[in-house]
Structures are given as C-alpha cells and as structure tokens.
Image: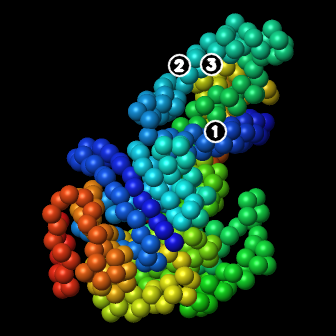
Amino acid sequence: MEPLFLTLKVAAIATLAAFHIGILLAYLLAHSSLPGKKLVEAFLTLPMVLPPTVLGYYLIVFLGRNGWLGKWLNDWFGMSIMFTWQGAVLAASIVSLPLVMKSACAAFENVDQTIENAARTLGSSEVGIFFRISIPMAWRGILAGTLLAFARAMGEFGATLMIAGNLPGKTQTLPMAVYDAVQAGNDSLAGTLVVITSAAGIVILYLSGLLLEKNG
Amino acid sequence: MNIQVCFQKKLRTKNRDFDMNIDFQSHALFTILYGPSGAGKTITLQMIAGLQRPDSGFIAVGDRILFDSDTGVDRKARHRNIGYVFQDYALFPHLSVKNNVAYGLRKKWNPFLGYREKLQVAEILCLLEIESLTDARPEELSGGQRQRVALARALVRKPELLLLDEPFSALDQNLKVRLRKQLSDIHTCFHIPVIMVTHDLCDVRELGRTIVRYGCGMIKMVQTGRKENCRVCGTEKFQLYQDGDSTAAA
C-alpha cells in the first residue's frame, strides 16, 4: 500500500501547486490582450502534448546535479531534488498545470466583462473583483480542471521516472509499482493496482463532468 | 451641477474604424444622450465612468475633474463615485438581491456589513419596493425587477452622478410607461444628476431636460429645455427635433 499513499501525497501537493499557479496564470491570460498571449499560452500548454520523457529530460537539464539551477542549488544549499519524492511532485505539478490553467482560463473568459465593469463602478479594486466576482463565478470550471489535474498527477509516469527514479519506498508511485509488478510477473499485485487506479480515474472524471454540466 | 464632457477617441476594430469627437456640457439634472445605435452613446457613458480611456480630452462632474489629458488626471473607475446601470443590468448572478445591493458598501477586507450599511440596504430596497425579493437570485427576477435591483445597487452608494444605459430597452411597452414614471419619481427623490442613453423618442419627451443628439461619433446638437432654445454644436446641418419624429435622423 505504500505506493498508493505516496501517490496520493505527491498528487495532492502537486495539484495544490498547480491549482494556485494555474489560476493565477489563467486569470492573467484571460485578462490580457497582448499580442504574445497565444504564444505564452502555447508554451504553458506544452507539457500536455510533450512526451513525458522529453519533459523529464528538460527537468534534468535544469535541475540535475550539473543542471543550471540544480548546480547552483547543490553548491549553495547542498540539496538536490533528483531521486526524491519532491522531484516527483515537481514533475507531477508541471504535467498537471496546463489542465488547471486551460479550464480556469475558459471559465474566466466566460465571466461577462460587463459584470466586472459593474463591480468596478461599485468601488471594487482589481483584487476585489478577482475574489468576489471572478472566482465565485468561475469556480465550477476551476474545480473541474483541478480534479482532472489531480487524476493526471496520480498517473504521472515518464517524467517522474526520469527525475525521481523508481526507488521502492522512496519514490515508487502507483504507476511505477504497476510497471515493476508486471516486469516481475506479479500479476495479482498488478491487477489490484490497476483496478485501484482505474476506479480513482473514473470517479474523478465523473465528478468533473458533473461540475461542467451544471455550468452550461 | 455642471457636467462637462469633451474627448476624442479612435476605435480600431477589424471591421470598423470609428473616430469619436464628443463635446457637450449640461447643467440640467436630467441629460439624455439620444441617437441611432452605433453612434457612440454607450462609449461616452463608459468614458465618464472610467471604464474606457479617451485618447485625449476633459471630463468633469461639478468641480471634480475625472479625466484631463493635459494635466494627466485619470481617476480610476472605482474612485469616481458614479452609479452605472448597464443595459442588461449586469447583476451579479452568484449573489442574492440583498448582496447585489450591498456589494458597493462593503469595506475592504471585511466580509461583513456594519449596522449602518445594513440599514442603508434595507432602506433602498424598501424605497424601490423590492424588499420582498431580498433573498432572491437575479435569475429568478423579471426584467422590471432586475432593473430596480440594478438601480438600487447603484443608488445605495449615493453617487454624484447616475448613468443609465437604455434602461427600458429590455422591457415591454406597458412596463416601460410605468417604470419611466417611477424613474422620474426616484429621480426627484434622490436629486442626483442623471445621464441616460436612449434611442426611444418617448424617453426623450417624458424625461429629457437637456438632450444631446448623437450622429456617428459626433454630436449634432445640444438642446436644453424647450425645443425653441437649442444650441447648435458642430458644423453639420441638422434636422430640428420634432415631436412625433420616431426614427433617428442619422
């Protein structure tokens, strides 16, 4: 059961990070009219379409012991996120970020500009509008995206394998455990893990679908 | 109170280049902006409210300068203290009527209303005869009720100026007549200067004191009081305003 708990921990923290960063980015994107907006959006969505191994490669280049940021972190603080569960969190948050961002962006764009203008004439600041108008009106879309992000974070394999490895008891998440079990010919364990993962996925997708249905 | 509006704005969209050059003054308590749709009336309201920025110009309400491109004054919309009733009322769909009205009274970082603010909300709901709708959601209201909630929401902050963007366009004829009378009463009671956009001549006849007539992006005529004493604005020849003329002479 250890892989299950680790997966839940990694996915929960990753989703929390993706939730906050994704909402902020989505709000800025939905409200900007700069010409480079689509390009920025494309870059932020890239983790959704890139093979996870490519993403893992980028992460190693940045954060590996000889990577740009990793070298600096290692020299000054003596720490590295390679082969730790924090590395798995990072990988999972990056792949799930576009899911939060995309749905939140669509939800924010759905909020009528006139309603925000009404709040402005009633003395609301931009921050006030964000918390009192945009978030309450877009919460369904945001929550649906966050659920998807959690499911995606739970299923993260490729990038996690490259940056955090597959160390039983340390960085072995559920997808890794399935891979290991199949490799070792332990079909009954693999079967159990597969059922758990699938059930979680179905529940999450169903809830997310319910949320979006009421939105329309 | 003297309202002074003078601005230039170039609007560029894919399908339309629109140059606005607006200049009018009004001393009346009830000013009507009248003209065909697409003439820039709503944009004028947005400029006054601070929701759009003119390229250059000068906007003042009383002795308060809201925008002046020469001295770089540009007050933020939230500091202008101008009530704005939008054409589709723009009520907050996630809030009850009471909370819609209370929205503009809440202090920063304090989710609760003070005793005085609560009283103000109750008072305005009562005055506009919508106290029975206190806990209703905007989606449950009829057009006329929505309009009154939007009015209450704007009036409860005691604005220095009230902007109405075609307040009757979404309503049927019978309701229009009744609400026009009601608006007139409310206006007498609050004594706040009003600028109203309309393309309905009945509104002009019933409510107008100063009538600002719009052509495309410019002002054709400003008219105060009776139709005999009208002041000419701009160089273009214009048709005199006639009672019974039901289409806008664009």
- Disc 1 to disc 2: CB gap under 8 Å: no
- Viewer-nearest of discs 3 and 1: 1
- Viewer-nearest of discs 1 and 2: 1
Circle 1 packing at 10 Å, graded few (<14), some (14-19), many (20+), is some
- Identify the secondary structure beneath mark 3: helix
* 3D distance between C-alphas at marks 3 and 1: 18 Å
**In terms of depth relative to the viewer, which is nearer, B183 or A62?**
B183
Q: What subunit carries mark 1?
A: A
Quadrant position of the C terminus of chain B in the picture: bottom left
* Amino acid at pointer 3: Leu
Residue designated by label 1: A21
Residue visible at 53% across and 43% down in the picture: B71
* Amino acid at pointer 2: Val
Q: Quadrant of residue B39?
A: bottom left
Image mark for residue B52: none
Image mark for residue A54: 2
Residue visible at 60% across and 45% down in the picture: A23
- Disc 3 to disc 1: CB gap under 8 Å: no
Q: Quadrant of residue A178?
A: top right
Q: Quadrant of residue B82?
A: bottom right
